[in-house]
Image: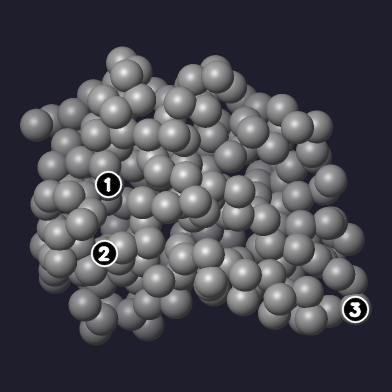
């Protein structure tokens, strides 16, 4: 299949890139700047896509983040603190970016349709469901249905990780020889992973549960 992959340069989307390529698919990677504070992930995405010889586009939707500056999302509102701790904590809802995946999937679908590709893919996974409504299987199914109706050219939405936990994705990445050290997760967006925000906490836990050495450098 010819697939446009929503590619952040994070652990999950990188494992998905390697999985889809190993299955013999042709990939085009789309990275979106939506005004996120952790924009360092974009540089990581560029490096990883280049290493794999993938067609790669970076779409500037930073104005989307500007629209949400008054929101309660700490990822686009610089006046809010990035919460620390586990994703299961109520405080992690502060990292929800309103309607993010619908916007990102719609952009990926537009590119895929224009190229007459077969599908778009994103790496929503089971561990995200607690706080991210747009990572639920129900949401992905609804987007698959909507995008299939958006144009005369039929397009599917692929979400193969939607029932997997993070440590299972890490285990799969080990099998696929994913360069985890090249991936970026931290929401703070410093030069080194902070080790304390929700996504760093989840990343550390995933490597531990998978029984795999974590190559990530953390500040704390």
Residue to which mark 1 is pinned:
199
Disc 2, SS: helix
Q: Compare marks 1 and 3 and give the one earlier in the sequence.
A: 3
Query: Residue placed at 47% from the left, 45% from the top?
Result: 164
Q: Quadrant of the C terminus?
A: top left
Q: Image check: 147 left or right of 93?
A: right
Image spot of residue 80 (x, y percent)? 14, 68
Query: Residue placed at 74% from the left, 42% from the top?
Result: 27
Image spot of residue 214 (x, y percent)? 30, 21
Tag 3: Cα neighbours inside 10 Å, few (<14), some, or many (≥20)? few
Query: Residue placed at 77% from the left, 81% from the top?
Result: 150
Alpha-carbon span between mark 3 and mark 2: 36 Å
Q: Residue furthest front?
A: 163
Question: Please, is residue 30 above or below residue 204 in the view?
Answer: below
Residue 152, numbered circle: 3
Q: Image check: 16 left or right of 207?
A: right
Disc 3, SS: loop
Image spot of residue 44 (x, y percent)? 46, 37
Q: Compare marks 3 and 2 and give the one earlier in the sequence.
A: 2
| Figure coloring | one colour
Disc 1, SS: helix
Tag 2: Cα neighbours inside 10 Å, few (<14), some, or many (≥20)? many
Q: Is residue 52 visible?
A: yes
Mark 1–mark 3 contact, CB under 8 Å?
Answer: no
Mark 1–mark 2 contact, CB under 8 Å?
Answer: yes
Residue to which mark 2 is pinned:
95
Q: Image check: 119 left or right of 35?
A: right
């Amino acid at each position: 299949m010819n697939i446009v992959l929503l590619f952040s340069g994070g652990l999950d989307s990188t494992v998905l890139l390697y999985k889809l390529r190993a299955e013999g698919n042709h990939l085009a990677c789309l990275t979106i700047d939506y005004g996120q504070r952790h924009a360092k992930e974009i540089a990581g995405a560029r490096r990883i896509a280049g290493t794999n010889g993938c067609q790669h586009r970076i779409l500037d939707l930073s104005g989307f983040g500007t629209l949400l500056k008054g929101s309660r999302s700490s990822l686009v509102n610089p006046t809010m603190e990035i919460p620390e701790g586990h994703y299961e904590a109520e405080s992690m809802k502060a990292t929800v970016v309103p309607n993010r995946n619908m916007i990102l999937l719609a952009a990926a679908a537009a590119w895929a349709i224009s190229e007459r590709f077969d599908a778009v893919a994103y790496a929503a996974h089971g561990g995200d469901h607690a706080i991210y409504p747009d990572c639920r299987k129900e949401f992905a199914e609804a987007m698959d249905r909507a995008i299939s109706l958006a144009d005369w050219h039929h397009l599917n939405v692929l979400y193969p990780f939607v029932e997997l936990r993070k440590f299972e994705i890490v285990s799969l990445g080990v099998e696929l020889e994913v360069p985890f050290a090249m991936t970026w997760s931290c929401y703070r967006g410093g030069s080194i992973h902070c080790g304390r925000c929700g996504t760093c906490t989840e990343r550390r836990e995933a490597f531990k549960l998978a029984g795999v050495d974590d190559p990530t450098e953390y500040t704390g």
